Image (spheres, grey):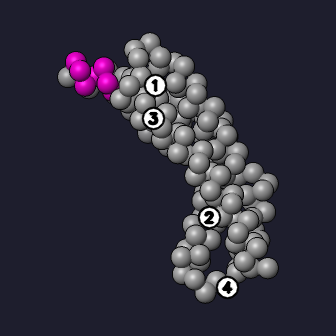
Amino acid sequence: AATDAYETLTKELREVARLQEIEGILSYDEQVFMAEGSAASRAAQKEALAGMIHAKKTGESMRAAVDACRGLALDDPRRAANVRDAIEELDTESRKSKELAEREARLESEAFVSWKGAREASDFSKFAPDLSKIFALK
Protein backbone atom coordinates (compact mmCIF):
# COMPACT_ATOMS: atom_id res chain seq x y z
CA ALA A 1 0.00 0.00 0.00
CA ALA A 2 2.81 2.43 0.88
CA THR A 3 4.56 1.67 -2.41
CA ASP A 4 1.36 2.26 -4.40
CA ALA A 5 0.71 5.55 -2.61
CA TYR A 6 4.27 6.70 -3.21
CA GLU A 7 4.14 5.71 -6.91
CA THR A 8 0.91 7.66 -7.34
CA LEU A 9 2.52 10.70 -5.73
CA THR A 10 5.62 10.50 -7.93
CA LYS A 11 3.41 10.28 -11.03
CA GLU A 12 1.67 13.49 -9.98
CA LEU A 13 4.98 15.18 -9.20
CA ARG A 14 6.43 14.18 -12.59
CA GLU A 15 3.48 15.78 -14.36
CA VAL A 16 4.06 19.03 -12.47
CA ALA A 17 7.78 18.85 -13.26
CA ARG A 18 7.05 18.48 -16.99
CA LEU A 19 4.86 21.57 -16.95
CA GLN A 20 7.54 23.46 -15.04
CA GLU A 21 10.09 22.40 -17.67
CA ILE A 22 7.86 23.95 -20.33
CA GLU A 23 7.71 27.09 -18.20
CA GLY A 24 11.51 27.12 -18.11
CA ILE A 25 11.73 26.80 -21.89
CA LEU A 26 9.32 29.71 -22.32
CA SER A 27 11.36 31.82 -19.91
CA TYR A 28 14.65 30.95 -21.61
CA ASP A 29 13.21 31.77 -25.00
CA GLU A 30 11.80 35.03 -23.63
CA GLN A 31 15.18 36.09 -22.30
CA VAL A 32 17.32 34.92 -25.22
CA PHE A 33 15.44 34.64 -28.50
CA MET A 34 12.03 36.32 -28.27
CA ALA A 35 11.39 38.96 -30.92
CA GLU A 36 10.59 42.51 -29.89
CA GLY A 37 6.85 43.04 -29.76
CA SER A 38 6.09 39.52 -28.55
CA ALA A 39 6.15 40.33 -24.85
CA ALA A 40 2.40 40.64 -24.36
CA SER A 41 1.78 37.30 -26.04
CA ARG A 42 4.50 35.60 -23.98
CA ALA A 43 3.14 37.11 -20.77
CA ALA A 44 -0.28 35.67 -21.60
CA GLN A 45 1.26 32.26 -22.36
CA LYS A 46 3.16 32.21 -19.08
CA GLU A 47 0.08 33.38 -17.20
CA ALA A 48 -2.01 30.53 -18.65
CA LEU A 49 0.70 27.98 -17.93
CA ALA A 50 1.11 29.23 -14.36
CA GLY A 51 -2.60 28.66 -13.83
CA MET A 52 -2.31 25.11 -15.15
CA ILE A 53 0.71 24.40 -12.95
CA HIS A 54 -1.03 25.79 -9.89
CA ALA A 55 -4.15 23.74 -10.61
CA LYS A 56 -2.03 20.60 -10.99
CA LYS A 57 -0.06 21.33 -7.80
CA THR A 58 -3.19 21.90 -5.72
CA GLY A 59 -5.83 19.81 -7.47
CA GLU A 60 -7.79 16.88 -6.14
CA SER A 61 -5.46 14.23 -7.57
CA MET A 62 -2.36 15.85 -6.04
CA ARG A 63 -4.13 16.38 -2.72
CA ALA A 64 -5.26 12.75 -2.65
CA ALA A 65 -1.75 11.51 -3.52
CA VAL A 66 -0.13 13.68 -0.87
CA ASP A 67 -2.73 12.78 1.77
CA ALA A 68 -2.20 9.07 1.05
CA CYS A 69 1.50 9.54 1.80
CA ARG A 70 1.16 11.66 4.96
CA GLY A 71 2.49 9.73 7.91
CA LEU A 72 3.94 6.87 5.86
CA ALA A 73 7.00 5.25 7.38
CA LEU A 74 9.36 5.06 4.42
CA ASP A 75 12.73 3.36 4.83
CA ASP A 76 14.34 5.12 1.88
CA PRO A 77 15.43 8.62 3.02
CA ARG A 78 15.07 9.98 -0.53
CA ARG A 79 11.48 8.84 -0.72
CA ALA A 80 10.80 10.27 2.72
CA ALA A 81 12.31 13.58 1.58
CA ASN A 82 10.18 13.56 -1.57
CA VAL A 83 7.04 13.04 0.52
CA ARG A 84 8.09 15.75 3.00
CA ASP A 85 8.72 18.20 0.15
CA ALA A 86 5.44 17.31 -1.59
CA ILE A 87 3.50 17.93 1.61
CA GLU A 88 5.23 21.27 2.12
CA GLU A 89 4.66 22.30 -1.52
CA LEU A 90 0.96 21.40 -1.39
CA ASP A 91 0.47 23.20 1.90
CA THR A 92 2.28 26.31 0.60
CA GLU A 93 0.70 26.42 -2.86
CA SER A 94 -2.79 25.83 -1.44
CA ARG A 95 -2.55 29.16 0.36
CA LYS A 96 -2.16 30.91 -3.01
CA SER A 97 -5.03 31.32 -5.44
CA LYS A 98 -4.77 30.32 -9.07
CA GLU A 99 -5.37 33.96 -9.97
CA LEU A 100 -2.40 35.04 -7.86
CA ALA A 101 -0.16 32.45 -9.50
CA GLU A 102 -1.26 33.72 -12.91
CA ARG A 103 -0.74 37.36 -11.92
CA GLU A 104 2.77 36.58 -10.64
CA ALA A 105 3.72 34.93 -13.92
CA ARG A 106 2.36 37.79 -16.02
CA LEU A 107 4.04 40.43 -13.88
CA GLU A 108 7.39 38.62 -13.95
CA SER A 109 7.22 38.50 -17.73
CA GLU A 110 6.25 42.16 -18.01
CA ALA A 111 8.94 43.14 -15.50
CA PHE A 112 11.58 41.38 -17.57
CA VAL A 113 10.79 43.70 -20.48
CA SER A 114 11.08 46.81 -18.30
CA TRP A 115 14.27 45.50 -16.69
CA LYS A 116 15.79 44.89 -20.11
CA GLY A 117 14.95 48.44 -21.20
CA ALA A 118 16.22 49.90 -17.94
CA ARG A 119 19.47 47.99 -18.22
CA GLU A 120 20.06 49.12 -21.80
CA ALA A 121 19.37 52.73 -20.79
CA SER A 122 21.29 52.43 -17.49
CA ASP A 123 18.18 53.88 -15.85
CA PHE A 124 16.89 51.87 -12.89
CA SER A 125 13.87 54.17 -12.55
CA LYS A 126 12.37 52.49 -15.64
CA PHE A 127 12.33 49.16 -13.80
CA ALA A 128 11.53 50.37 -10.27
CA PRO A 129 7.71 50.43 -10.66
CA ASP A 130 7.58 46.81 -11.84
CA LEU A 131 10.01 45.72 -9.13
CA SER A 132 7.78 47.39 -6.52
CA LYS A 133 4.76 45.52 -7.93
CA ILE A 134 6.65 42.22 -7.66
CA PHE A 135 7.56 42.89 -4.02
CA ALA A 136 3.98 43.92 -3.23
CA LEU A 137 2.62 40.76 -4.86
CA LYS A 138 4.99 38.41 -3.04
Question: In the rendered image, which quarter is residue 134 located in?
Answer: top left
Q: Which residues are magenta?
A: 115-121
| Residue under numbered circle 2 | 86
Q: Are marks 4 and 3 in contact (CB under 8 Å)?
A: no
- Camera-side residue of 62 and 115: 62
Amino acid type assigned to the residue bearing label 2 in the image:
Ala
**Nearer-N-terminus badge (4/1):** 4
First reached walking from the N terminus: tag 3 or tag 2: 3
The residue under label 4 is 73
- Where the N terminus falls, by quadrant? bottom right
Disc 1 marks which amino acid? Glu
Quarter-of-image position of residue 66: bottom right
Q: Is 73 situated above or below 106?
A: below
Report whether residue 130 is seen: no
Q: Where's residue 11, x and y in %?
A: 68, 60
Circle number at residue 110: 1
Image coords of residue 6 (percent x, y): 70, 72
Q: Gap in Å between the C-alphas at discs 3 and 2?
A: 24 Å
Q: In the rendered structure, which amino acid carries the disc numbered 4?
A: Ala
> Is 52 placed above or below 40 here?
below
Identified at 69% across, 65% down, the residue is 9
In front: mark 4 or mark 1?
4
